[in-house]
Structures are given as structure tokens and as C-alpha cells.
Image (cartoon, grey):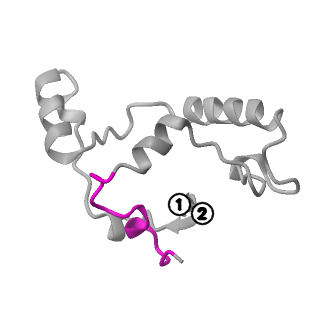
Amino acid sequence: MTTLPRFRFNEQAVDASPAALGPLRSSTDALEDRGELHQRMALDGYLFLPGLLDPDQVQAARTSSLERLAEQDLFLPGHPLDEALLKPGVDMRSAGYAALDSTPRLTISPCSICSTPAT
């Protein structure tokens, strides 16, 4: 049985189960139709392309990135690198993200996708 990885957003657990997220529309049937991909992105807000990338290559790229970050002593010791648990006080958000995150036009609270209520 495959176990889904744990996702976190703003230090809150995110329920990424199909029941919580709802069905995702695959766009693999439209890979050769750029216009259709643009339409789906505009309509759905995402492109779901299962099987497009080799999972081993994705994991290798992730591990490589995490190893470079670990060299900067950003992660909590005693945890697997793959968990990427940041030390208290480490903030990896860029200035661009901070500006976007504080935009009043955002009408949805990020914690509305969290499985636990925000405090």
C-alpha cells in the first residue's frame, strides 16, 4: 500500500487526500494542444499531468536541492533530510512571496486548506 506524503503549509498539516482535494482533471490528453492547456489552466487554475515526469528523477532533483539547503544548516537535526523540517526562526519565503501573501486581493485564507484550524 502506498502512503501519501505529509504536506504542510504555514506549519499546518494539509489534507492532500483525494476526498479532501476532490477529483483532479487530467490534462495528459491535451499535451499536444497548447491552446487547450492554456484554457484548462485558466479554467481550473492548475494542470494535472500524471506520469509526465519520472518519479525517480523528481526525487533525485528534490534530494539534490535539500542537500544544498542542508549545507546551510537550515534543518532540524535528528530528522530525515526528506522531511525538510526547518529550524525554528528559519523563514525560506522570498520577498516576492511575502508581498504576494500580504496582498488584500487574496480572498481565501491559506489556512482554509489546512486540516487543522489556524490559531
Q: Residue at x 20, y 38 (%)?
A: 41
Foreground: 116 or 91? 91
The answer to whether any part of residue 33 appears in the image is no
Point out residue 109 in the picture as x, y percentages from the top left corner: 37, 64
Quadrant that contains the N terminus: bottom right
- 75 lies left or right of 62: right
Q: Is residue 97 visible?
A: yes
Q: Residue at x 19, y 47 (%)?
A: 44
Q: Amino acid at mark 1?
A: Leu
Is-magenta flag for residue 54?
A: no
Q: Which residues are magenta?
A: 104-118
Question: Given the image, on which type of amino acid does mark 2 rest?
Answer: Glu
Q: Main SS type for the magenta part? A: loop
Q: Residue tagged by mark 2?
A: 11
Label 1 SS: loop
Instruction: Find numbered disc 2 in the image and state the secondary structure of the residue it sits on.
Output: loop
Q: Which mark is residue 4?
A: 1
**Residue 110 inside the magenta-drawn segment:** yes
Give the image location of residue 37, x and y in percent.
18, 30
In the image, residue 42 above or below residue 24: above
Mark 1 or mark 2: which is in front? 2
In this view, the residue in front, 49 or 101, is: 101
Residue 21: quadrant of the picture? bottom left
Asked if 63 appears above or below 85 in the picture, the reply is: above
Q: CA distance from mark 1 to mark 2?
A: 18 Å
Quick one: which residue is furthest to the right in this view?
78
